Image (tube, rainbow, N blue to C red):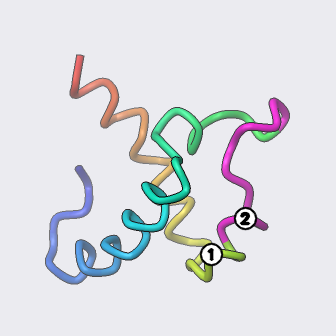
């Protein structure tokens, strides 16, 4: 949802693979950093992903969850 063109989907493939391998899910990606569970900018950058993509993904999580209800 929100990543409709081919280039965006290609960019997301390695991110998806890494996050699944590291056992992240939409709840832990969106969780509050204060709770010590959420994805931090530091972790994201350690994965060598662009920080702007984290912001974009986090912004789409709520809409995705609502669409699945």
Asked where in the image residue 55 lies, by quadrant, the reply is: bottom right
Image quadrant holding the C terminus, namely: top left
Q: Which mark is residue 5?
A: none
- CA–CA distance between discs 1 and 2? 6 Å
Q: Position of residue 6 (x, y in %)?
A: 14, 78
Residue 43 position (above or below residue 31): below
Q: Is residue 55 left or right of residue 4?
A: right
Element under label 1?
A: loop
Q: Is residue 43 left or right of residue 62?
A: right
Residue 40 position (above or below residue 48): above
Q: Position of residue 45 (x, y in %)?
A: 69, 75
Q: Which residues are magenta?
A: 34-44
Q: Is residue 24 left or right of residue 3?
A: right
Is 53 colored magenta in this rendering?
no
Q: Which residue is mark 1?
A: 47
For the point 55% across and 62% down, which residue is it? 54
Is 39 colored magenta in this rendering?
yes
Q: Position of residue 31 (x, y in %)?
A: 65, 34
For the point 34% across and 28% down, which residue is it? 65
Q: Which residue is mark 2?
A: 43
Badge 2: residue crowd in 10 Å (few <14, some 14–19, many ≥20): few
For the residues labelled 1 and 2, say whether their Cβ atoms are less than 8 Å apart.
Answer: yes
């Amino acid at each position: 949802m929100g990543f409709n063109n081919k280039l965006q989907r290609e960019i997301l493939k390695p991110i998806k693979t890494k996050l699944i391998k590291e056992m992240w899910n939409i709840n832990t990606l969106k969780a509050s950093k204060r709770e010590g569970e959420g994805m931090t900018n530091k972790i994201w950058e350690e994965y060598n992903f662009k920080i702007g993509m984290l912001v974009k993904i986090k912004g789409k999580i709520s809409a995705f969850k609502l669409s699945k209800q």
